[in-house]
Each structure stands twice: as C-alpha cells, then as structure tokens.
Image: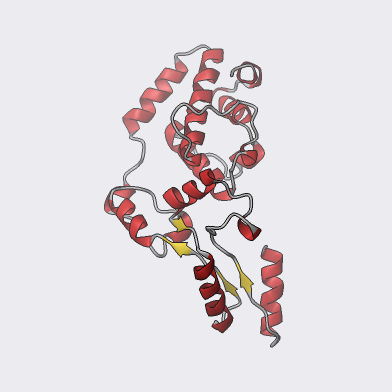
C-alpha cells in the first residue's frame, strides 16, 4: 500500500536495502493469485491490457527487480500491441497505460453523441417517476455488465454490493465515466464508493437529475 511504499522509499533514501513490487496478474491460482476467478482474469486482459504471468516469467521479473536501483516496481505482462490496435479502432486506453499507448484519433470522439444523450434525456423526462427509476436501473445494470465483462442476459441484483462482485477503484471510475457520459452530467469520482449498489446509484441519479427519491421503487425491482 501507499504507506508501505513511502516507508520503503525513506529506508532506501537512508541507504538501506528496500524494494516494493506491485505484481500484475499471475497465471496460477494459488498463492498471490488465489481467489482471482476467470471473469476477473478475462476483464483485466480484455479491458486492462494485462496478461497473466507464468511462474517462469514471474521469477525472471523478480530477478530483474533485484538488479534494479528503483524502490517501487510493477512486474506485469502488458499487451501493448493489443491496446494499440484497440486504440486505433477508437477504444479507450486504460488511464494507467496512457503514457505507453497513444490514443487513436477516433478515441477522442465522444462515446455518446449529443443526439443520443438528448434522446435519452427526453425519454426519461417523459416517464412517471417509478418508470423513470426502472429505466435508470436498466441503464445502470447494463453499464455494470459492460464494465465487468458479463455476458448478455446476466442481471445484477439491485441490492448487490458492487465490490462484492469484482469492482475495484478502476472499474468504479469507469462506471462513473460511462454513466456521466450517457446522462450528460459530471458525477463525483466517489460515485460507486458512496453508492455501492445499483439501487443506491439509481437513487442518487434520480435525486441528482430530478430531485426524486427512487429508493423505494428500485429496491422492489428484480
């Protein structure tokens, strides 16, 4: 964590040996990689540009880290070729890798056009409060499924804790960005942390956009 990294940096500055390794994804399912399911692996590979390290590759990177004069290192296997191809096709480059992969010209285009955003706003505004909450719930569910790489038809329960099903700080930020782009409103970076279920996100959006409390209708929807 950041506190330990800072401690190691101070130790190294004082002339003592210190090194922090922030490991990437491992191919094996034991030890540090225990608990990493196939869905998480697929999401990191497909959307994050991170490939799984074999034990041999991990040991090679460990040896290289020991020879480095840097305190903090990130031993990871990155699919930069795939990320560059995706960026050229207009995909968004993960924020942490934008210093390594130049965003393609198409990626600067907004993911949602002004007309699409306006049509969604008009559709929502024309619905009764209960139906509007249901529509927002489907919108939120769809974006959650996209972020986590779920297959079509997988529906997240309105009361399901998002961090219980694989969300982390990066996917939380991606969901915030996607929802903000769709509804045309800048949302706080802590959206998912402050409202960690689909129902709570919908209630927040309803109050933010329409001054409505959507907790009741959404909580009953499955």
- Residue 34 drawn above or below residue 117: below
- Residue 178 drawn above or below residue 74: above
Q: Position of residue 95 (x, y in %)?
A: 46, 55
Q: Position of residue 183 (x, y in %)?
A: 45, 31
Residue at x 55% of width, y 83% of height: 67
| Quadrant (top left, top right, bottom left, bottom right) of the N terminus | bottom right
- Between 198 and 64, the residue placed more toward the observer is 64
Q: Residue furthest top?
A: 128
Q: Position of residue 94 (x, y in %)?
A: 44, 53
Q: Where, by quadrant of the figure, is residue 200 drawn?
A: top right
Residue at x 67% of width, y 82% of height: 12
Q: Position of residue 39 (x, y in %)?
A: 52, 43
- The answer to whether one can see residue 213 in this image is no
- Between 217 and 186, the residue placed more toward the observer is 217
- The answer to whether one can see residue 115 in this image is yes
Horizontal arrangement in the rendering, residue 194 relative to residue 48 (left or right): right
Residue at x 46% of width, y 26% of height: 153
């Amino acid at each position: 964590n950041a506190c330990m990294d800072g401690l190691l940096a101070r130790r190294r500055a004082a002339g003592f040996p210190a090194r922090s390794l922030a490991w990437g994804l491992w191919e094996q399912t034991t030890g540090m990689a225990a608990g990493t399911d196939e869905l998480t692996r697929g999401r990191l590979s497909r959307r994050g540009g991170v490939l799984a390290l074999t034990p041999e590759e991990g040991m090679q990177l460990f040896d290289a880290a020991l020879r480095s004069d840097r305190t903090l290192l990130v031993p990871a296997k990155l699919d930069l070729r795939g990320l560059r191809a995706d960026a050229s096709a207009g995909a968004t480059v993960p924020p942490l890798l934008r210093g390594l992969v130049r965003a393609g010209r198409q990626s600067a285009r907004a993911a949602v056009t002004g007309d699409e955003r306006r049509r969604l706003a008009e559709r929502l505004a024309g619905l009764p409060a209960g139906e509007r909450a249901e529509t927002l719930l489907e919108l939120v569910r769809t974006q959650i499924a996209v972020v986590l790489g779920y297959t079509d038809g997988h529906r997240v329960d309105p009361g399901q804790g998002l961090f219980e099903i694989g969300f982390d700080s990066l996917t939380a930020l991606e969901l915030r960005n996607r929802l903000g782009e769709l509804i045309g409103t800048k949302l706080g970076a802590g959206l998912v942390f402050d409202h960690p279920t689909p129902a709570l996100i919908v209630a927040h959006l309803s109050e933010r956009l329409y001054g409505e409390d959507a907790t009741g209708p959404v909580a009953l929807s499955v």
